[in-house]
């Protein structure tokens, strides 16, 4: 279970209230700057910043602050959101995602790590990894890509058993619905491969916050 870990003690008083408000603005400002930089890096020099990824990331940052406050849990969630934003933009642009993203998510999982959660984290990772790996061997044409498998396993390890399944189901359902509508509107083949990481990312962030 993800619990808020305070960065600093909260005291009642005007000074501490202003300090808390300032901390919220500073953390959110740094997060938005990082999001903007990632979005600008994903497009060519003369192209506009992609609005949807920026707006979705901004909403995630606000929700994290509202739910968890200025805590390690919020900062961890924001770093996860930035990693997933980078992975999603890369998947949309090149259909490839660096292995560094999965490694960073695994490392991030150890921030605020509690030994009691390790069995759930390992079980969660196996629940996601084993079926997808088996499908890749038995039916390679129907399996997810290598980046999808690595990122979903890393996310499952971070979220633990239960939340990993929720994230995967939400991501897959969202992908099926959105891509079915997109292909229908654009008269494209429904069997055509599509980037899955953006949808997995949405499911993972929902699971992290809930």
Image (tube, grey):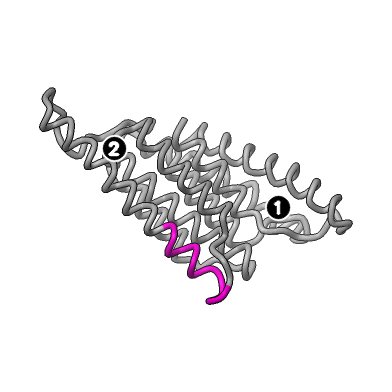
Question: Would you name the residue on which mark 1 appears?
Answer: 135
Q: Residue at x 48, y 42 (%)?
A: 59
- The quadrant holding residue 115 is top left
Residue 106 versus residue 13: which sits nearer the camera? 13
What is the CA distance from the residue labelled 2 to the residue labelled 1?
A: 32 Å
- Tell me: 99 left or right of 110: right
Count residues near mark 1 (Cα–Cα under 10 Å), then give few for <14, some for 14-19, many for 20+.
Answer: some
Mark 2 vs mark 1, foreground winner is 2
Question: Would you name the residue on which mark 2 appears?
Answer: 114
Residue 110 versus residue 125: which sits nearer the camera? 110
Looking at the picture, how far across and down is residue 56, in whole percent?
A: 53, 46
Instruction: Find the residue positioned furthest to the bottom.
Output: 45
Tell me the SS state at disc 1: helix
Looking at the picture, how far across and down is residue 164, in whole percent?
A: 53, 38
Tell me the SS state at disc 2: loop
Residue 186 versus residue 133: which sits nearer the camera? 186
Earlier in the chain: of badge 2 and badge 1, it is 2
Residue 36 colored magenta? yes
Tell me how many marks there are: 2
Q: Which residues are magenta?
A: 35-46
Count residues near mark 2 (Cα–Cα under 10 Å), then give few for <14, some for 14-19, many for 20+.
Answer: few
Residue 166 versus residue 49: which sits nearer the camera? 49
Q: Is residue 12 above or below residue 200?
A: above
Q: Is residue 85 above or below residue 75?
A: below
Residue 67 colored magenta? no
Q: Residue at x 57, y 34 (%)?
A: 166
Q: Residue at x 57, y 49 (%)?
A: 129
Looking at the picture, how far across and down is residue 17, in whole percent?
A: 17, 30
- Tell me: 112 left or right of 210: left
- Tell me: 191 left or right of 130: right
């Amino acid at each position: 279970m993800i619990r808020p870990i305070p960065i600093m003690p909260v005291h009642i008083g005007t000074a501490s209230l202003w300090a808390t408000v300032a901390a919220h603005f500073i953390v959110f400002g740094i997060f938005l700057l990082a999001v903007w930089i990632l979005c600008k890096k994903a497009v060519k020099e003369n192209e506009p910043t992609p609005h949807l990824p920026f707006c979705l990331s901004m909403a995630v940052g606000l929700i994290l602050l509202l739910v968890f406050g200025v805590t390690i849990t919020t900062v961890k969630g924001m770093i996860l959101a930035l990693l997933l934003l980078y992975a999603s933009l890369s998947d949309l642009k090149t259909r490839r995602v660096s292995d560094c993203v999965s490694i960073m998510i695994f490392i991030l999982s150890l921030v605020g790590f509690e030994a009691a959660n390790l069995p759930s984290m390992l079980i969660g990772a196996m629940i996601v990894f084993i079926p997808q790996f088996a499908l890749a061997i038995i039916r390679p044409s129907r399996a997810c890509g290598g980046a999808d498998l690595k990122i979903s396993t890393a996310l499952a390890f971070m979220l633990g058993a239960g939340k990993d399944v929720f994230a995967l189901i939400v991501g897959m359902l969202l992908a099926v619905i959105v891509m079915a509508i997109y292909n229908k509107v654009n008269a494209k083949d429904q069997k055509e491969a599509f980037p899955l990481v953006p949808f997995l990312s949405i499911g993972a962030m929902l699971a992290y916050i809930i």
